[in-house]
């Protein structure tokens, strides 16, 4: 037992001597001391030099053409805006703009009275041409300006494809429109006709097909007499 302990101590002492020699060979002892000094709380970092900011006045380079001229002076001024009203002047010099806030809706009684007058005028025309009566709605005379025609009339008398259709008023003035066959109605150009004749909700119009692509149009005013030129 004692001999085993002595042998262990001897081997331990030899390992320590070998480790010491290795440390000396690697100079680890001095390196450890230098690290301890650098991490000492009494050591202070070297003060850094303060930044020096220099301010200089420089001359702004200007173009040779304006270098000798005085600096520009900017002044706020008021400019009057010229507002061009949305008015399309077309045949007859009518205004293409309407104030939709002043829409007037016809009563059922006034609408029925205008329709009765249109029926009488249609019979008095005694025309061999196909005719139909259309009572105006707000969608016909304001906003969308789309005029749908009776489907049965379109299928029997109007072209099977889109065509230019002329509307002739009671003064003989022509207004070109576009007939859309698949929608059986008048599109482009109808707006101009409606505004030029001041059509309103409840007016009754008689359409007389005088040729395959032309309508003669008679207007019966709601809440008023007809235009008085129909039979002429």
Image (cartoon, rainbow, N blue to C red):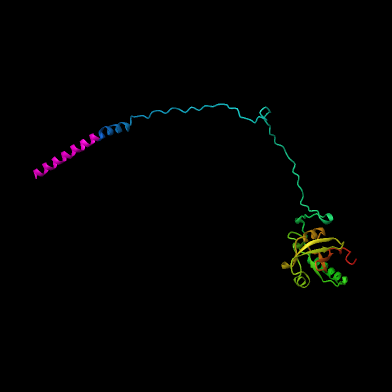
Q: Does residue 19 belong to the magenta stretch?
A: yes
- Locate the N terminus by quadrant: top left
Image location of residue 128, percent across then percent down: 86, 73
- Residue 5 in the figure: left or right of residue 171: left
- Locate the C terminus by quadrant: bottom right
Residue furthest to the right? 232
Q: Nearer the viewer, residue 197 or 63?
A: 63
Q: Is residue 194 above or below residue 28?
A: below
Image location of residue 158, percent across then percent down: 78, 69
Secondary structure mostly seen in magenta is: helix
Query: Image quarter for residue 206?
Result: bottom right
Query: What residue is shown at x 26% (from left), y 32% (from top)?
Result: 30
Image location of residue 31, percent across then percent down: 28, 33
Image location of residue 64, percent across then percent down: 66, 29
Q: Does residue 223 belong to the magenta stretch?
A: no
Residue 222 can be seen, yes or no = no
**Part of the protein shown in magenta:** 1-25
Q: Nearer the viewer, residue 215 or 196?
A: 215
Q: Nearer the viewer, residue 159 or 170?
A: 159
Number of labels in the image equals 0
Residue 3 can be seen, yes or no = yes
Residue furthest to the front? 64
Q: Is residue 93 above or below residue 16?
A: below
Q: Nearer the viewer, residue 83 or 166?
A: 166
Query: Image quarter for residue 221?
Result: bottom right
Q: Is residue 113 above or below residue 3?
A: below
Query: What residue is shown at x 82% (from left), y 66% (from top)?
Result: 214
């Amino acid at each position: 037992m004692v001999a085993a302990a002595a042998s262990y101590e001897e081997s331990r002492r030899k390992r320590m001597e070998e480790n010491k020699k290795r440390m000396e060979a690697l100079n680890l002892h001095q390196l450890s001391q230098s690290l301890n000094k650098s991490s000492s709380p009494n050591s202070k970092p070297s003060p850094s030099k303060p930044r020096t900011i220099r301010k200089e006045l420089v001359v702004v380079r200007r173009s040779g053409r304006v270098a000798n001229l005085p600096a520009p002076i900017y002044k706020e001024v008021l400019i009057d805006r010229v507002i061009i009203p949305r008015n399309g002047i077309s045949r007859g010099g009518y205004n293409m703009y309407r104030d939709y806030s002043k829409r007037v809706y016809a009563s059922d009684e006034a609408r029925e009275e205008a329709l009765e007058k249109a029926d009488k005028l249609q019979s008095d025309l005694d025309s061999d041409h196909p005719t139909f009566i259309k009572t105006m709605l707000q969608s016909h005379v304001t906003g969308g300006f789309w005029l749908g025609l009776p489907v049965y009339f379109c299928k029997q008398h109007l072209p099977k494809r889109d065509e230019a259709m002329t509307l002739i008023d009671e003064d003989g003035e022509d207004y070109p429109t576009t007939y859309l066959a698949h929608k059986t109605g008048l599109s482009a150009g109808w707006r101009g006709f409606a505004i030029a004749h001041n059509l309103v909700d409840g007016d009754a119009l008689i359409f007389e097909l005088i040729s395959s692509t032309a309508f003669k149009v008679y207007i019966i005013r709601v809440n008023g007499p007809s235009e008085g030129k129909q039979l002429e």
